[in-house]
Amino acid sequence: MILVNGRIVMEEYFNGHTPATTWQWNSTGKTLVATTTGIARQEGILDINNKVSDYLGTGWTSEPTEKENLITLQHLLSMTSGINDESNLVIKSNLTYLADAGTMWSYHNVFQVLMDVIADAAGQNFDTYFNNKLKDRIGMDGFWNNGLIFTIYHSNTRSMARFGLLALNKGKWMNEQILNEAFFTESISSSQNINPSYGYFLWLNGKTSFMVPGSQTVYQGALIPNAPSDMYAAMGAEDQRIYVIPGKKMVVVRMGVASDPQNPNFALSGFDNDLWGEINAVINTK
């Protein structure tokens, strides 16, 4: 699906997928958690510079207390908690020390802890707060599936596009500022200097280098060379995507089975650059 100036200019479905089909966002849904965190901050119920233990109490990890107390909400948002990334199962026994918070970028499922922090700060379960403060206000459908390992959002494609439009408009929906622009600007800025292509659960194009999940290798150059340099994107496993291009007032949504089912990826894949090569062949001739 492609939207320009808030209007759908292309909407195509394949392999039995329809406008009514509910599909998993995978890690694209992390951006929903970041946005909800920002809303909670603007309501004054949490501070992203505070320690996670201020909300969940000491002992939420299996780290030494002095190391656990280094971890702030901002470290969770930027994937720099320093928690061991060997297991995606977020239970206390797996949350062990690997590095001091802020010294290492590592893509990790521990972002889910932010949902517990928001629930504690709001005095209600995360789903209720999310529905009231974000989902219902922009007219999304969908639900959170709280699996044993992964917590994943499911919705139809147009609901994913609605969130893309909110991101294009820097947190504004119609005439209402759902998320204040200052936090949104933080979200689409390099959240640390280890992986400049990562904001708050959003991937940033046009930076000098990038890292990918499951690796400590630093790659030189832009994340997606074929894509506009001002693009930021929510990326999930099996090529679930929301690309936002402010300079073209464009949102591109891709939802469905992996482009290469034999080699599914957690985030970035060769699909991204190939897709943007095809998109460029169309938009550059207009």
Image (cartoon, rainbow, N blue to C red):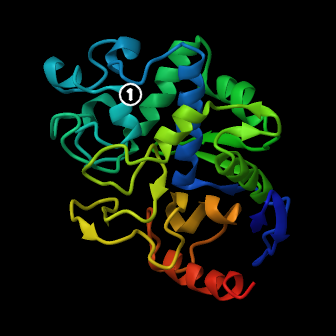
Q: Residues within 10 Å of mark 1 (few under 14, many from 20)?
A: many
Residue at horizontal 76 percent and vertical 50 percent from the top:
162
Relative to 173, is 224 above or below?
A: below
Q: Position of residue 57 (x, y in %)?
A: 34, 12
Residue at horizontal 39 percent and vertical 16 percent from the top:
56
Q: Position of residue 31 (x, y in %)?
A: 55, 45
Left or right: 157 in relation to 73: right
Residue 254 visible at all: no
Q: Amino acid at mark 1?
A: Leu
Compare residues 214 and 90 and report the one nearer the observer. Answer: 214
The picture quadrant where one finds residue 254 is: bottom right
Residue at horizontal 53 percent and vertical 29 percent from the top:
37
Compare residues 254 and 230 and report the one nearer the observer. Answer: 230
Q: Which residue is mark 1?
A: 73
The picture quadrant where one finds residue 79 is: top left
Compare residues 73 and 49 and report the one nearer the observer. Answer: 49
The picture quadrant where one finds residue 11 is: bottom right
Q: Position of residue 191 (x, y in %)?
A: 37, 43
Q: Position of residue 193 (x, y in %)?
A: 26, 48
Relative to 202, is 251 above or below?
A: below
Residue at horizontal 14 percent and vertical 19 percent from the top:
66
Describe the element under mark 1 as helix, strand or loop: helix
